[in-house]
Image (cartoon, rainbow, N blue to C red):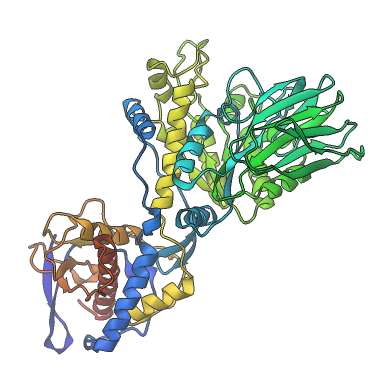
Amino acid sequence: MGASQRRLPGGQKVTIAVASFVAVGALMAFRPAAAAGSPPPAEAPQEARQERLAAAQFIARALAPADSRRLTEHSAEEQELRRLAASLHAPGAHLENPCLERTGPFCTRTVLEPFFSALDGLRTGQTSSPVKIAAFGNSLIAGDRIVDIVREQFVRRFGDGGRGLLLIDRLAPYGPRTRTGTADGWAVHTVGELKESSWPFGLSGVVHVSNQPRARSRFSLSGESRGTLFWLDQNPGPVELRVDGHPLLQTEPRNEGQHQQADFMLPAGAKTLELIAHQRGTALQGLALDKSGPGIILDTLGVPSADASLFLRADAAMVADQLRARAPSLVLVMLGGNEVKRLQWKRSTSSQVERDLRRFLQRVTRATPNAACLVVGPVDAVLGPEATQPFQQREHLDEVIDMEREIALEEGCAFFDMFTAMGGTGAIQRFHTQGLMHEDLVHPKGRGLDVLGALLADGLLRSWEDTPRTEPSAALARAWATLLGVELLSHGAHPTPQARGVALLPGEPEGPWTAGIRRVLDTARTRGPSPGLSLAGPSSLKCATLVPRLGMAADGSGCLPVTPPPFPAGLQDPFQRGSVVGAWLLAELVRYDTLASAWQVP
């Protein structure tokens, strides 16, 4: 780190040490600006200092993670999955959560804010109803192992809201642990079939049709208090629901050809729910079982062999109606694997894949405008056992990942790169070496799917923990104006040719204070990749900032001193104290940067 002394107008000296900082002049606009030759401002009176302290506390609360977002310790099962992921060289990945609204350089609202705010409500006890996730996908989702792990990890932290949307019967002999009960007498049709079905599809992408009189399904209950039956009013007989052997309700078909839903309440302490279709040809699209209290519900909406083009076979109005009825806080879409194969087999083109992915994403997001959206990229894809080089990566994988990311961000969704999270190129071979792949080299076995679920859950939970809580932009702008002593003119992000960071001179080893400071600096995108960040002492904080125009020396001497503000008696948590100091530090750096930049220095 270098420094130089510059004599400023009025005979005053300030020592500027070289570290790094966001090019504040490109990110913020201020009023009024100091004219060339103006002396530095006088020290603020005590009343103004207290106002600035209050503003710093408000900013710190906005930039630092809320106490309620601190993650709980990992369970024994979660720790085991983390160890397995490490042995597979699956490092996880940062979830891209784009900013929707800024105050100066700081993000005040992200794409995932509706979901994260709903989680906050569960954690703080302010939400009394379930928070729902709708997870669309291909066989990796349909198998239910990936979403089972996501469901389990979220339920452990936020409570169990019920089993969610279930299918009338299993789709295949393999798979679901959560999606169905026991059933007999049903034929299944899905959007993933080669030949397009004459049956209309709704949200689940699946229709079960009774192929014998008195076809039935039986579901175990574990505290669910309400449910919804989705059925087609198309030449059916009545459907009867029975709880613990006692009649609950019976549908009244009118043969109007419309999709219907029957809502019902379940008696307290009920153990089983049985569904009986009395006639052949009765078509059902799913059954939702929810609890009435707070907790997480994850609706699994996966269909084997499906891609975006096949999901578009479903009736758009029916999907929209049923999705609105479920009212998810997060819509999750995990597609791409089948698109990669069909591109290689010349069964589709890049333009068709892009068009269909975008149309499907628009369909589900426009039906739920108040929900957050997350796109999960495909897993590693290889040529397979019949190829000369079975573990060679499929040529269109990178193209589809880049395409999905671009579409997600353009359509207002977050993006999680599962290929990177599982270790990138060679991941399938590493999974195979440890016995975690089926012979087709496409589908991971159960424990391999559990690892993928853990990677996704960790990405979501880490993003929730790291994303600052939403604060009103106007209030945040006022706080910055008070703290800086100048007015922020712009609430938008401006282009900057060089993003720089903040460094503190070496001092004591890192501790809770510095963790809070680091958090604020990280959030502000102002810390470089590897500066030392520590405290010089309990009563003063030494810092350094770069003003590019001043032509720094490289002797490493001196820095700009910033003294932490006095803390209120009630602010005892070291992390929160550090967060306040971080906001105060940022403001001081901005003030001095702006002041020095206003002088014309040769």
Q: Is residue 328 visible?
A: yes
292 sits left or right of 145 in the view: right
User: Which image quarter: residue 91?
Assistant: top left
Q: Residue, x 89% and y 37% (percent of image)? A: 253
Q: Nearer the viewer, residue 191 or 202?
A: 202
Q: Nearer the viewer, residue 420 or 141?
A: 141
537 sits left or right of 128 in the view: left
201 sits left or right of 466 in the view: right
From the top left corner, tell me how far across and down residue 522 is, in percent: 31, 57
User: Which image quarter: residue 288?
Assistant: top right
The quadrant of the rendering that contains the C terminus is bottom left
From the top left corner, tell me how far across and down residue 480 is, in percent: 37, 75
Q: Nearer the viewer, residue 602 or 488?
A: 488
Vertically, is 454 above or below 6? above
Q: Residue, x 40% and y 54% (percent of image)? A: 69
Vertically, is 246 above or below 547? above
From the top left corner, tell me how far across and down residue 549 is, in percent: 24, 71
